């Protein structure tokens, strides 16, 4: 336990993991929207029990997910554009 608090570590941060980010965000957005739709018929019950915020949280998650999809698609396109430009520059050097 003393080694844990002995001071700053000298390790470098690992590289970020890249994966199917667009698919992950899209799946999460769909899940939030499905949860909203499934809870919608129980609006009265949620209102009576003070849990109406559950419904609006799911809708907010779906809305923010749409912004997230837009963002990660732009990011993915920029990464691919940069990679293609790097390949073109490398070919020009040779």
Image (cartoon, rainbow, N blue to C red):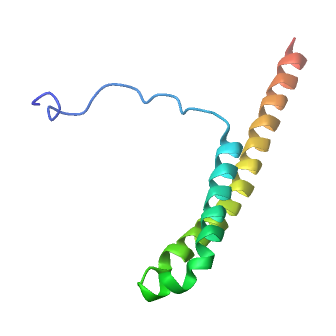
Quadrant that contains the C terminus: top right
Q: Residue furthest left?
A: 2
Q: Residue furthest top?
A: 94
Residue at x 56% of width, y 82% of height: 43
Against 19, residue 88 (above or below) is above
Against 88, residue 7 (above or below) is below
Residue 24, image x and y in percent? Answer: 64, 45
Residue at x 84% of width, y 31% of height: 85
For residue 21, which quarter of the picture?
top right
Residue at x 44% of width, y 79% of height: 51
Quadrant that contains the N terminus: top left
Against 15, residue 69 (above or below) is below
User: 27 or 64: which is nearer to us?
Assistant: 27
Against 60, residue 94 (above or below) is above
For residue 35, which quarter of the picture?
bottom right
Image position of 78 (left or right of 24) = right
User: 63 or 80: which is nearer to us?
Assistant: 63
Image position of 33 (left or right of 5) = right
Query: Could you tell me how many numbered marks the image carries?
Result: 0
Image position of 94 (left or right of 65) = right
Residue 4, image x and y in percent? Answer: 17, 32
User: 93 or 86: which is nearer to us?
Assistant: 86
Residue at x 62% of width, y 53% of height: 28
For residue 92, which quarter of the picture?
top right
Residue 89, image x and y in percent? Answer: 84, 24
């Amino acid at each position: 336990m003393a080694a844990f608090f002995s001071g700053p570590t000298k390790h470098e941060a690992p590289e970020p993991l890249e994966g199917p980010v667009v698919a992950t965000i899209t799946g999460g957005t769909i899940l939030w929207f499905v949860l909203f739709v499934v809870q919608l018929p129980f609006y009265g019950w949620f209102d009576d029990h003070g849990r109406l915020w559950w419904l609006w949280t799911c809708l907010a998650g779906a809305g923010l997910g749409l912004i997230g999809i837009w963002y990660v698609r732009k990011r993915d396109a920029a990464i691919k554009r940069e990679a293609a430009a790097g390949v073109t520059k490398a070919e020009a050097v040779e």
